[in-house]
Amino acid sequence: MAAPTTYFVDPSINADSGAGTVGDPYGDTKYAVDQNTFDTTNGNKLAIKSGTDEVLTESLNTTFTTNSWSPTANAPIIIEGYSTAEGDGGIGGISGNGSIAIINSTALDFIFLKDLHMHNTGSANVCTIGENCVVDNVEFDNSTGDGLTIDRFCNVIQCFFHDLAGDGIAHVDHGTTVLFCHFVNDGTSDMDNCVVINNGGNAVGFCLFDIDGSTDGIFSNHNTPYILIIPFTRMAEQGQASICQPIEMAAY
């Protein structure tokens, strides 16, 4: 697989304009997808410029489906932030405009999310994706729902979850790894659970749970076998150690 076809988006332009290059970016993500046929050989990347949020009028999966953007193992959809150049670590912001999930499809597999801030979705879950996905350095917040809902064979790395009233990461299924993530009850909304595991064969490790007794660190919906828990840290806040209930097993 060669490099995916990249389209640059600068939400500060806020217009149906541009050519999708770094020098002349599109002014809106939906417009960027509407203008282009999906690269079924190598996939597509949407590079979202930092500084101004992309404010959605519909979930991105709806936009993808309308335009037949259907990712595969060899042709994924990548959504990545940037500041001035592709892959420079800039954080692209995507807002749900107070009511819209950023992505809302468990059938949307092979999605890679990197260097993003996804937030402001109201009661909707911030992001729901399918199998074989990678989520790297993404902040999820400002929702009374869940932060991230995923399926099987996903990797979640270096992500930050806070100001959520549901779960941080929900519906973790077979073959998923959660590493170096930070979960915080920040006084605005407290999570029900940091990580909810539905089936076995997963690993959670090196995560920071800054939570209180109302929130479970890792919650298993069944007497789930084969959960590898690598050592993680409990953080003290304001002079008091956070109470972490590392694992709770629900009855069948």
Image (cartoon, rainbow, N blue to C red):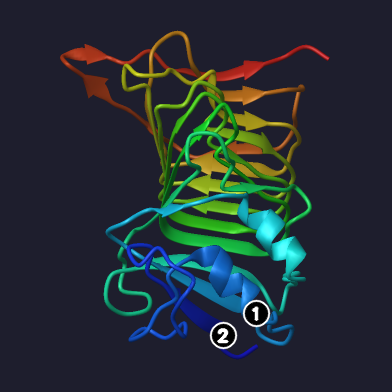
Label 1 amino acid? Answer: Gly
Q: Residue at x 37, y 69 (%)?
A: 10
* 99, 251: nearer the viewer: 99
Marks 1 and 2: CB-CB under 8 Å? yes
Q: Residue at x 46, y 82 (%)?
A: 20
Rendered image: mark on residue 43: 1
Marks 1 and 2, how far apart at CA: 6 Å
Q: Residue at x 59, y 34 (%)?
A: 125
- In the displayed structure image, the side of residue 95 where residue 84 appears, left or right: left
Crowd rating for badge 2 (residues with CA inside 10 Å; few <14, some 14–19, many 20+): some
| Above or below for 63 versus 159 | below
Disc 2 target residue: 5
Q: Quadrant of the N terminus?
A: bottom right
- In the displayed structure image, the side of residue 53 where residue 199 appears, left or right: right
| Above or below for 83 versus 92 | below
* 63, 175: nearer the viewer: 63
Q: Which quadrant of the view contains residue 92?
A: bottom left
Label 2 amino acid? Answer: Thr
Q: Which quadrant of the view contains residue 188?
A: top left
Q: Residue most toward the bottom?
A: 2
Crowd rating for badge 1 (residues with CA inside 10 Å; few <14, some 14–19, many 20+): many
Tell which circle, 1 or 2, labels the residue nearer the N-terminal end: 2
* 108, 15: nearer the viewer: 15
